[in-house]
Amino acid sequence: MQIIPAIDIMDGQLVRLTKGDPSTKQQYRTQDPVEAAREWANLGADMIHIIDLDAALGKTPNTDLILGIVEEIDIPLQVGGGIRTIETARKLLDGGVGRIILGSMPIKSPKETRMLLEEYGSDRILIALDHKDRYLMVKGWQESTQHRLSQSLRNFTIQGYEWFLVTNIDHDGTLEGPDYKTYTEISTRAKIIASGGVSSLDDIPRLKKTGVQAVVIGKALYENRFNLAEAKEAVRC
């Protein structure tokens, strides 16, 4: 199981939110996303997870900043937040982003999303299944849908998508533990990346047992609950 440090960007700075609510914004000592990405790469991260919160909330995107990070470090980025057109997706992928995260687009523009799948391959298209009470949420978690998590996962895998970022919004940024039950239920059906709720090293081997391929960790690392080396060691336990 892979450990993926997270960088959320708002107003050009690194922040963390709780349950996706902008009013809960927290800033940390390292506020420069480029500096943070460089530090994670130097500490041995295999990949970095970047969310453009401004783009997700319909504000001016941080695309140039993100593409600048691509040039600064030599490990892959998986990038999401506000990628709602094929032009934006291509700009990121052609600019060197390893994998893009799509949430609203597969639901609102399925034909264009499948075009990206055919053009770039399933390893570079990550479908975000952000959910609350097992119903998907889109547009920066501001809009609810009638799409159920389990059925959506089934539909997308039939279409050829292989990688899914699954976040229970009620767990995100809370440091109250991941949604183990959901991950155990779905991890045999696709390649799942867990996100949300990790608070201690004990969460990591428990997540590994659910069968997920990777876990995105943000607040627990920034608040020094443990460090990246300890997290990677916990995977091996």
Image (tube, rainbow, N blue to C red):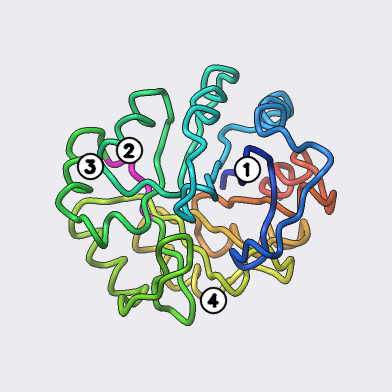
Label 2's element? helix
Q: Earlier in the sequence, mark 3 or mark 2?
A: 2
Disc nearest the viewer among 4 and 1: 1
**Magenta stretch encompasses residue 15:** no
Distance from disc 3 to disc 1, alpha carbons, whole Å, reads: 30 Å
Circles 4, 1 touching at the beta carbon (< 8 Å): no
Q: Is residue 178 placed above or below 221 in the rendered structure?
A: below
Q: Earlier in the sequence, mark 4 or mark 2?
A: 2
In the drawing, what numbered circle is on residue 196? none
Label 4's element? helix
**Magenta stretch encompasses residue 126:** yes
The residue indicated by pointer 2 is: 89
Disc nearest the viewer among 3 and 2: 2
* Location of residue 69 in the rendering, given as x and y in whole percent from the top left corner: 57, 25
Distance from disc 2 to disc 1, alpha carbons, whole Å, reads: 21 Å
Distance from disc 4 to disc 1, alpha carbons, whole Å, reads: 35 Å
Q: Residue at x 40, y 65 (%)?
A: 138
Disc nearest the viewer among 2 and 1: 1
Q: Residue at x 63, y 43 (%)?
A: 11
In the drawing, what numbered circle is on residue 11? 1
Q: Earlier in the sequence, mark 3 or mark 1?
A: 1
Distance from disc 4 to disc 2, alpha carbons, whole Å, reads: 32 Å
Front residue of 163 and 17: 17
Front residue of 230 and 72: 72
* Location of residue 74 in the rendering, given as x and y in whole percent from the top left corner: 56, 19
The residue indicated by pointer 4 is: 181
- Specify few, some or many for label 3: CA neighbours under 10 Å numbering under 14, 14-19, or 20 or more: some
What amino acid type is highlighted by mark number 4? Answer: Lys
Q: Earlier in the sequence, mark 3 or mark 4?
A: 3
